[in-house]
Amino acid sequence: MSWKVVLAGVCVSLIFGFSFLFTKNALDYVKPLTFLSYRFFVASLFFLFLLLSRAIRLGKKPYWKLWKLIVFQPILYFLFETIGLQRINASEAGMIVALIPILVNVLAIFLLKEKGDRYHYVLLLSSFIGSVLIVGFNLTKEALLGKVSMLIAMVSAALYTILARKLSREFEPHEISFSMMISGFVFFTIVSKLSGEFRLVLNVHTISAALYLGVLSSAVAFFLHTYMVKQAPSILVSLFSNLTTVVACLAGVLFRNERLGLQQILGVVIVLVSLLVMAYRNREKKVDAMQEDAEKTLEEDINSAIHVALLRKDLLLTPHAYERMIERNVSFEELKELLESKSSRAFMQKNGRIKISNGSIEAVLQPSGKVLYLVTVMRKRREWL
C-alpha cells in the first residue's frame, strides 16, 4: 500500500476508535434512532455545504446502483452498532471490531471466489478462537443482545467493504459518501418518527457527539475509507480495524473508566497477531504472483502480450517497469484496463516516449519497431483530491 493509503487508514482508525466513546456518551441521554437521525443530519449538512461551495461535485451517474451498499452501511451497520453500544461498553464494542478482517476473509471465499492455502485457514481458525475470547462468556440477556447486535453490525461492515471495492470503480469516494449520508438521514429520521421516539435533546454530550460523528466519523472517515478501498484490496483495508480496536479500548478505559479482562486482552492479541501474519503472507503471495506473471509476459511470444488498443501495438514489460508496478501497488489487471481501454488518452513526450493516462494511473511507453515497451507506471496524484 502507498503511504497515502496508510495515512488515510491511520486517520480512519483514530476517528472510528473514538466514535464508540462519543456514541456511548450520547446514548446516556437520547434514544438510538433519534441519535442516528442527529448524526446523519449533521453529516448531510456538511456534504451539502461542500457541494454548494463546489469543493465536491456529483457526476451524472446511476446512483441507484448504490442501494445494496446503503442497506449494509449506513442502515444495518449503524442500527445494530448503536443497539449494541446501549448494552455493552465501548471497549468491548471496539474489540468486536477486530472481527471485520476475519469476516471479510470468510465472505471473500463465497462472494469473490478467493481461496487460501491450509496456513491461511489455520490463521482464520486462530482468529476465530481469539474472537470467542473477545466476545466472552458473559451471557446475560442484556449483554448477549448487545454482543449479537455488534456481530451483525460487523457482518454488515464486512459486506460493505467488499461491495465498496466493486462500486468504487464506477463512483468517486465523495459520491458514495454523500449518497450514504443522505440516505442515512432520511431512513433514520422516518423510522424514529414512526416509532414515536424522536425528540430534540440538546446538551453538550449529544451536540458534541453529533458534530464529531456527523462531520469526522460519518463524512471525513467514510470518504477516506472509500478512497482506501479504491486503492487497495479489501482484506488489507479491513486490517486497519485492528488499530480501531486498540483506540476504542484505550478511549473506553481512559475516559469511561471501563475495565478489560485478561481473557479479552488475550483474545485481542491472538486476533491481531493472526491478522498481521495473514497480511504479510498475502503481500508475499501477491509479489510472487506478480513475479510469475512478469516472467511469463517477458518469455511468451509477442502475440500474447498486452495489446494497446489506443496505439494498435503490443506491449512488453521491462524489468524496471515490473519493479515500479510492485513498488506502487499497480496490478496487471489495472495496467491491462489502462492499455486496452479506448477511453484512455495518449500524449507524445519530447523524448519520443508516449504517456497514457485514464485519470487513475498513467504509464510511459517506449516505441520500438512494431512493439512498445513499458518504461514505468504510476498512480496520478490528483486522485487523492
Image: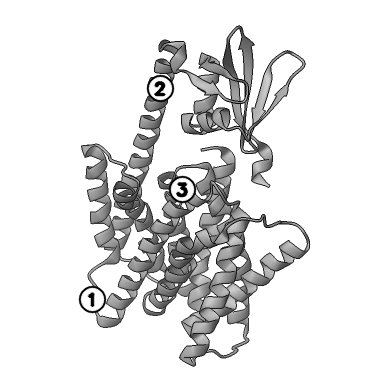
Q: Is residue 358 left or right of residue 340?
A: right
Disc 3 or 1, which lies upstream in sequence? 1
Q: Is residue 250 left or right of residue 310?
A: left
Residue at point 47% right, 18% down? 305
**Mark 3 vs mark 1: in front:** 3
* Measured Cα–Cα span from mark 2 to mark 3: 24 Å
Q: In this view of the protein, which residue sits in the foreground, 171 or 100?
A: 171
Give the residue pinned by disc 1. 139
Give the residue pinned by disc 2. 293
* Measured Cα–Cα span from mark 3 to mark 1: 32 Å
**Based on the displayed image, in which of its 4 quarters is residue 63 positioned?**
bottom right
Q: Residues within 10 Å of mark 2 (few under 14, many from 20)?
A: some
Residue at point 22% right, 43% down? 122
Residue 202 point in image, percent of width and height: 63, 87
Q: Residues within 10 Å of mark 3 (few under 14, many from 20)?
A: many
* SS class, disc 3: helix
Q: Can residue 245 be seen at all in this image of the molecule?
A: yes
Q: Is residue 343 left or right of residue 65?
A: right
Give the residue pinned by disc 3. 237
Residue 193 point in image, percent of width and height: 52, 88
Residue at point 61% right, 57% down? 175
Disc 2 or 1, which lies upstream in sequence? 1
The number of discs equals 3
